[in-house]
Amino acid sequence: MLSDIDILNSVKNKEIVVEPFNEEQAGPCSYDVRLGQEILFYTDEVLDLEKNNEYKRYELNNGDRILICPPWMNLSEEEKQELCEKYNCTIAFNGGILGLTMEYIELSDDVCAQYQGRSSCARLFLTSHQTAGWIDAGFKGKIVLEILAGDKPVIYKVGERIGQIIFLKMNSKCSIGYNDRKISKYKNQNDIIAFIPDNE
């Protein structure tokens, strides 16, 4: 696992690329990432692992306040609008959303990484990944976040720190990096790539 000194050295040596990079976002053994301006919300009543599901994409502004509501609230559009007006939010979502980090990263073939949500978010029962926190060696792109409020609605601001990336140095280079594999689905993502079924 890379320390803050290791992370800074790896960025200088181009083993790791983080853009934009801010030394103040480096913790003792991780690097903080911020919530970007793009949000994706699935609109299908049922999500199907064998097909491309319908969704709506939203482009927000830096500093916009979004209201993330737990799925069990089952709010109408009118109720969401009322909550936005009450709490000075730009938009409200009822259920899970996909977000994107502001930061673009590149990993060399002997560095892998793990995304973890921020502990301050966890204390409000806001998770920013469910099962997909692993980032393979050789990955290039922004990180897609699976964001879900578990208890009560949570207000979050675009551009605010939402999680952290932990970098790990491998004992040897992998035989082929993530972005060089033909079957890799989510490489080079600068926008949110929605779910892609295995049969495509």
Image: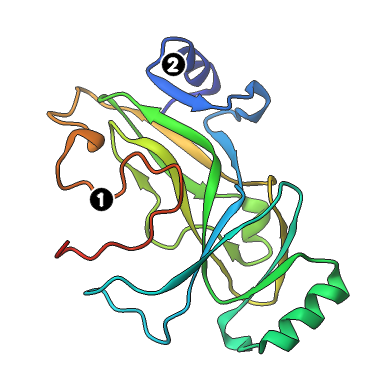
* Rendered residue at 76%/64% (across/down): 90
Q: Amino acid at mark 2?
A: Ser
| Crowd rating for badge 1 (residues with CA inside 10 Å; few <14, some 14–19, many 20+) | some
Label 2 vs label 1: CA separation? 26 Å
Of the image marks 2 and 1, the number of the one nearer the N terminus: 2
Residue 14, position as x, y percentages in the image: 41, 14
The answer to whether the residue labelled 2 contacts the one labelled 1, judged by CB atoms less than 8 Å apart, is no
Residue under label 2: 10
From the viewer's side, name the closer residue of 111 and 182.
182
Classify the position of the C terminus by image quarter.
bottom left
* Rendered residue at 31%/48% (across/down): 186
Residue under label 1: 185
From the viewer's side, name the closer residue of 129 and 36.
36
Q: Secondary structure at mark 2?
A: helix
Residue 174, position as x, y percentages in the image: 17, 29
Depth check, mark 2 against mark 1: the one in front is: 1
